[in-house]
Amino acid sequence: MDLLTWLRQEAQLKKMVLVIVFIALFLDHMLLSVVVPILPSYLSRADQASSTTSGNSTGSTVSSAIIQPLGNRSGSLGSTFATPHQSPTLSSDPPRSNCSGAEAELDAVNIKVGLLLASKSTIQLIINPFIGPLTDRIGYHIPMCAGFCIIISATTLFAFSSSYIVLLLARSVQGVGGSCLSVAGMGMLADMYKDSMERGRAMSTSFIGLALGLIAGAPFGSVMYQFVGKMAPFLVLAVIAMFGGGLHFLIFQPSQVQTKMEKGTPLLTLLRDPYILIAAGAICFTTMVVATIETALPIWMMKTMCASKWQLGIVFLPDSLSYLIASNVCGHLSQKLSGSWLSACIGMILAGITIISFGFSKTVYHVIVLNALVGLSVGTVDSSIMPLMGYLVDLRYVPVYGTVYAIADVALCIGFCVGPAIAGPIVAWIGFPWLVAIIGTVNIVFAPLCIFLFSPPRREEQVLITKEH
């Protein structure tokens, strides 16, 4: 018996589904976060080149100062941002920093970064309502294989892009691939692991891949960009995508799979379910916390803390590490489904308080601590709500999961779309502290609604209750 035959045995298929979904989530979220520390500096460099071409020497000088690594504070750089004996990252002064000379240029870049980061989620938001019903109809394997192929195309475009338009196209292509991977992957897990305890464990394990992608993405991108170049991190991700797609194709052979799927619940029916909407809202608003911070924080740090390129990626490391811890701990707690609502409620309140605190941060060390709390809170919500959405379908509808996880992914996309889209304009209008205060307040206000997820009724019970009233 060869290796492939052994892996295709029923006893091993569950493990292989988990491995492939793990790789898919790792890849999508690593590509999601790897661009976060690269974009501000890369777009500043592009603006500098444009300014040089048009003869705008003043803009060129400022942009050059922005993109230069700030760890070297000698010569003209020291005179631009700080005195030679002053440490920008340890300053306890209020955020009227000695980096203010670049504020106008950074605000312009902030809007560009926000639009580019939001483009992936916008496309994914449009595609998800089609991918969910499609997976219910043809199964999960063909969309999963297509997702890996599309991600390979996106990483290649990122690697060889030389203009903002091509970057925007690459990010949009990633949205299509991410939709296929996320919806098909979560559906595969929910379909393969029918037992609620097994499903909770499997999904918490798959979230390790998601967390590792977030952990590796920003630091990996910032270090590779500074010391190797822009192409390197994306080419590495292309190789990972080839490995994941090849493994899935060899084991499951999507072109030969004949899937008999039970007819799932229509999308509009699920969207009218208040319990599913509350669960999706919890995912959406906590995701908005991460998206807002990823978009606005690097430029806030450049303006108020004179942060260098590598610091812009490293500060997101504790975020991902604490997400990894929370998703594992709360993933096991979510096996007791009656406790999922409480974990989600606490996570949303913690996320709201934490993001508001970013407005008072003055040093890189403050940012690191707050990012750790963000990862803890968002990991708590995700690992509690995702298995719960599958349980809601089991309890109230036909147990076919593509559409409900398309709704979950739509909620994620709305968070990743609205966060970056509003971050740039709000920061330019009323400032970063007000931006984080608004997002935090929304999370705190929404959190008590999670109590309705304590003991959702079966669909039949719900119909009887409605008739009685």
Image (cartoon, helix red, strand yellow):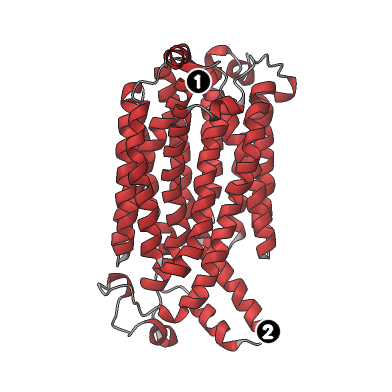
At a point 68% along the width and 65% down the height, the residue shown is: 162
SS under mark 1: helix
The quarter holding residue 338 reads top left
User: Which residue occupies 47% across, 11% down?
Assistant: 460
- Count of numbered labels shown in the rendering: 2
In the rendered image of this protein, does residue 144 appear above or below residue 72? Answer: above
Check disc 2 and give the amino acid type.
Ser
Q: Nearer the viewer, residue 193 or 96?
A: 96
Residue 67 visible from this viewpoint: no
For the residue pair 154 and 434, the one nearer the viewer reads as 434
Closest to the observer, 81 or 402: 402
The percent position of residue 418, horizontal first and vertical second, equals 52, 51
Q: Is residue 96 above or below residue 355?
A: below
Label disc, if present, on residue 393 of the rendered structure: 1
Tell me residue 372's x, y (percent): 32, 49
Q: Secondary structure at mark 2?
A: loop
Left or right: residue 357 compared with residue 253:
left
Q: Which mark is residue 54?
A: 2
Label whose residue precedes the other's in the sequence (1 or 2): 2
Q: Position of residue 171 (x, y in %)?
A: 63, 52
Residue found at the far right of this picture: 255
- Number of other residues with Cα within 10 Å of mark 2, as a class: few under 14, some 14 to 19, many 20 or more: few
Residue drawn where x is 42% and y is 13% of the image: 468
